[in-house]
Image: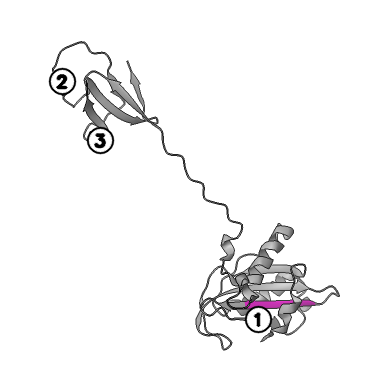
Amino acid sequence: MFIQSSSVASLVSEASLQAFCAAMNTPVVNIQELDVNPARAAIALCAGEYGETWLVVAVRSLASGEGVIFKYQGDPAEFGSEAAALEAGLSFAEGMGFIFDTDLMVGSESAGRKRAWKIWSSLIAPAGSPGAVEEPADSLGAEEPVESEPEECETLHFVGEIPGIESPHDEGGEEEDRLECEEPDWASHDGISGDGGGWRVNILRSASLSLR
């Protein structure tokens, strides 16, 4: 059974975190301790220096910034493993509509503990304080988007005939170059314009063509 406990917040430290799951969604939570509003949540399994353990669930309203902490009333060690203890916390918090990510401490304990402590601190910070910045758990440590390079374009200038397009100049004269494309589609003349002594064609480097 989980009960509300504000005193346990002072017992949780970055070093005490043993397992941590952050909610990936912000459902509308309808519980007695908070107004009915969307909220964030996290589950933490903590261990003290004398072997004592705590299983806690923090819930914070996005609208008011008010939060509440629930503590497992028994000894989490009775579950036999950290994974089993987390399952108990998940069952309780999922009943409020939350969906949780995997344990942040698995795979990279040091980095995971730093991320977990940052999330936990934002959940329990007093409403309106600088530490109460709402940051989605899945955005922490995310890579910055990489902008793609624009495609290069080159301009070919030649004098000659293009199949399906009448030249704006008088016929006759010696052809200097001829453009050949594989299966050309001249239905659209976008990128082609008459210019001075011939046609000016803008093409992408990925086009398959040759000059002869």
Principal SS element in the magenta part? strand
Q: Disc 1 designates what residue?
A: 69
Camera-side residue: 189 or 152? Answer: 152
Which percent across, then down, holds residue 71? 70, 82
Which image quadrant is residue 45 in?
A: bottom right
Do residues under tags 1 and 3 come within 8 Å of each other at their CB atoms?
Answer: no
Residue type at numbered disc 3: Asp
206 to 102, vertically: above or below: above
Distance from the alpha carbon under mark 2 to that under mark 1: 82 Å
Residue at position x 41%, y 33% in the image? 152
Judge depth for marks 3 and 2 and give the one in front. 2
| Magenta extent | 53-58
Q: Which mark is residue 169?
A: 2
92 to 163, vertically: above or below: below
Local packing at callout 3 (Cα closer than 10 Å; few below 14, some 14-19, many 20+) is few
Q: Is residue 199 magenta?
A: no
Q: Earlier in the sequence, mark 1 or mark 3?
A: 1
Residue at position x 14%, y 16% in the image? 171
Say left or right for 139 vs 150.
right
Which image quadrant is residue 12 in?
A: bottom right
Camera-side residue: 57 or 131? Answer: 131
Q: Which mark is residue 190?
A: 3
Judge depth for marks 2 and 1 and give the one in front. 2
**What residue occupies the far left of the structure in this picture?**
170
Q: Secondary structure at mark 1?
A: strand
Q: Which mark is residue 5?
A: none
Residue 104 in view of the camera: no
Do residues under tags 3 and 2 come within 8 Å of each other at their CB atoms?
Answer: no
Residue type at numbered disc 1: Ile
Which percent across, then down, holds residue 137? 59, 65
Distance from the alpha carbon under mark 3 to that under mark 2: 19 Å
Quadrant location of the N terminus? Answer: bottom right
